[in-house]
């Protein structure tokens, strides 16, 4: 768990937003940021976002539910959410564990994902949180 990224402390309730601000999430991160990673599946390799995962109850859409669009493919278990206005991927229901959401670390307020060193790459959905 990461308590700080660059100069930004991870708050117990940390907000995340898309680029245009239509969508705002609140992540409950009492222990800090869970293991950030990338995924090399056919979808994630195209978007390249650094993601982390939380139990579904720990992610709330506090603004912009109506702005969100869903993309699904394959087994249609995962739900990939993105802002219908600015196109930014915000979060997704995980195919490996639908009781969890992955979210875009780059959307966290004040967080520059390039301040993270050595972000591991998950292998197409088989990656598990250590
Ligand atoms: Zn947006």
Image (spheres, grey):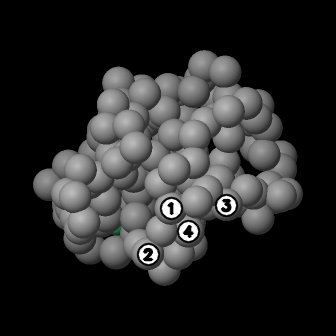
| Residue at x 76%, y 35% (from the top left corner) | 2
Binning the other alpha carbons within 10 Å of mark 1 as few (below 14), some (14 to 19) or many (20 upward) gives some
From the top left corner, tell me how far across and down residue 72 is, in percent.
22, 64
Q: Which mark is residue 121?
A: 3
From the top left corner, tell me how far across and down residue 45 is, in percent.
53, 75
Viewer-closest of 98 and 22: 98
Above or below: residue 28 compared with residue 62: above
| Residue at x 68%, y 40% (from the top left corner) | 35
Quarter of the picture holding the N terminus: top right
Q: Is residue 47 visible?
A: no
Q: Are marks 1 and 4 in contact (CB under 8 Å)?
A: yes
| Residue at x 40%, y 64% (from the top left corner) | 89
Local secondary structure at mark 3: strand
From the top left corner, tell me how far across and down residue 115 is, in percent.
81, 58
To which residue does mark 1 refer? 124
Q: Are marks 3 and 4 in contact (CB under 8 Å)?
A: yes
Q: Residue furthest left?
A: 66
| Residue at x 60%, y 19% (from the top left corner) | 30
* Label 3 within 8 A of ligand 1 by Cβ: no
Quarter of the picture holding the C terminus: top right
Local secondary structure at mark 2: loop
Local secondary structure at mark 4: loop
Give the mark nearer the N terminus: 3 vs 4.
4
From the top left corner, tell me how far across and down residue 16 is, in percent.
48, 48
To which residue does mark 4 refer? 40
Give the mark nearer the N terminus: 2 vs 1.
2
Q: Is residue 66 visible?
A: yes
Q: Are marks 2 and 1 in contact (CB under 8 Å)?
A: yes
Q: CA distance from mark 2 to mark 4?
A: 6 Å
Q: CA distance from mark 1 to mark 4?
A: 5 Å
Question: For this view, does 48 lie left or right of residue 23?
Answer: right
Q: CA distance from mark 3 to mark 1?
A: 9 Å
């Amino acid at each position: 768990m990461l308590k700080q990224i660059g100069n930004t402390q991870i708050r117990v309730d940390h907000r995340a937003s898309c680029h245009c601000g239509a969508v705002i999430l609140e992540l409950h991160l009492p222990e800090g940021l869970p293991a950030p990673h990338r995924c090399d599946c056919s979808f994630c390799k195209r978007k390249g976002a650094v993601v982390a995962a939380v139990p579904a109850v720990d992610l709330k859409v506090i603004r912009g539910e109506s702005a969100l669009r869903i993309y699904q493919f394959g087994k249609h278990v995962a739900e990939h959410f993105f802002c219908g206005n600015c196109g930014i991927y915000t979060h997704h229901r995980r195919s490996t564990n639908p009781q969890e959401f992955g979210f875009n670390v780059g959307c966290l307020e004040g967080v520059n994902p390039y301040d993270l060193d050595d972000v591991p790459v998950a292998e197409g959905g088989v990656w598990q949180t250590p």
